[in-house]
Image (cartoon, rainbow, N blue to C red):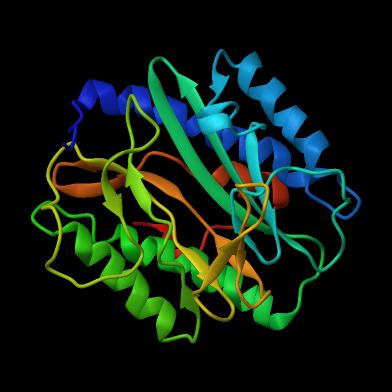
């Protein structure tokens, strides 16, 4: 059953989402060649706890760390390791917090130094596809409209969109109903209503949409070994329209970047 949120609950959830955003912004200038993912993970845990929250992923379903850190062909759920980042890598950082009884959860994929042109386009297009999906979060639309829009945008550019892993409702639990696939048919699924809060998170592969899992039981890889990108926002329906509770602005401020025009939903 979908748990629709009151305005008061949404404002509390905004605080959780914004702490995730601040955590990613704190990490952004440190995600450079030579950085050790496991050390970044510890910094994130300390930052989250210093702000009166708990790292949501740590111990969830048995996950061993505070961040999911997935380089290159890893799609999601990567376990932070001791291997230094190298120029040309990309790194998806997925972060969650639990604060004031509500969860925040979002993600950004960072280039490490200069990356090749195909990968640069993959990152740009995956991020834009997130906003293509967000624009469909209108009261009266259906959940399937989100995935259909993302799929159409993504596949028109020659990428594979991961099917086995999806976005989700968000609230007092990290994973609530409804599931929010990044593919599908418009006009299908639950009707979008006032108070819905969901995490939308396209996972886009440079090659095939097919994936495989490592023996660690967590890490998801592209089946063909090509790069994958992942971007995620928390989105609420307020006055019938989408409102993004999380933000990439802390990342942009840290890296001297400006948001794209399409980000002004």
Q: Nearer the viewer, residue 252 or 174?
A: 174
Residue at image x 18%, y 26%? Answer: 6
Residue 72's spot in the image, x, y percent?
A: 71, 65
The answer to whether residue 19 is seen in the rendering is: no
Residue 234's spot in the image, x, y percent?
A: 39, 43
Q: Looking at the rendering, in which quadrant would you find the C terminus?
A: bottom left
Residue at image x 35%, y 70%? Answer: 150
- Residue 109 left/right relative to 236: right
Q: Which residue is situated farthest in the front direction here?
A: 215
- Residue 148 left/right relative to 117: left
- Residue 194 left/right relative to 127: left
The answer to whether residue 83 is seen in the rendering is: yes
In the image, residue 50 above or below residue 71: above
In the image, residue 41 above or below residue 204: above
Q: Which residue is situated farthest in the right direction here?
A: 34
Residue at image x 12%, y 68%? Answer: 187
Residue at image x 64%, y 31%? Answer: 66
Residue 28's spot in the image, x, y percent?
A: 71, 45
Q: Looking at the rendering, in which quadrant would you find the N terminus?
A: top left
């Amino acid at each position: 059953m979908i748990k629709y949120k009151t305005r008061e609950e949404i404002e509390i959830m905004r605080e959780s989402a914004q702490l995730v955003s601040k955590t990613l912004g704190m990490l952004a200038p440190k995600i450079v060649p030579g950085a050790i993912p496991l050390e970044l993970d510890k910094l994130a845990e300390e930052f989250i706890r210093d702000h009166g929250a708990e790292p949501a992923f740590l111990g969830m379903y048995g996950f061993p760390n505070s961040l999911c850190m997935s380089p290159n062909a890893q799609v999601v759920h990567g376990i932070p390791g001791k291997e230094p980042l190298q120029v040309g890598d990309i790194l998806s950082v997925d972060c969650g917090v639990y604060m004031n009884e509500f969860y925040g959860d979002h993600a950004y994929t960072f280039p490490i130094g200069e990356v090749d042109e195909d990968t640069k386009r993959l990152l740009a297009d995956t991020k834009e596809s997130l906003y293509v999906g967000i624009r469909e979060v209108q009261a009266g639309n259906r959940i399937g409209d989100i995935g259909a829009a993302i799929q159409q945008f993504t596949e028109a550019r020659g990428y594979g969109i991961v099917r086995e892993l999806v976005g989700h409702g968000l609230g007092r639990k990290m994973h609530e109903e409804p599931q929010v696939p990044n593919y599908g048919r418009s006009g299908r699924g639950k009707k979008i209503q006032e108070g819905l809060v969901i995490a939308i998170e396209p996972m886009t592969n440079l090659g095939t949409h097919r994936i495989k899992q490592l023996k660690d039981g967590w890490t998801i890889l592209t089946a063909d070994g090509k790069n994958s990108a992942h971007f995620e926002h928390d989105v609420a329906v307020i006055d019938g329209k989408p409102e993004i509770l999380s933000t990439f602005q802390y990342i942009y401020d840290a890296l001297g970047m400006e948001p794209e025009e399409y980000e002004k939903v």
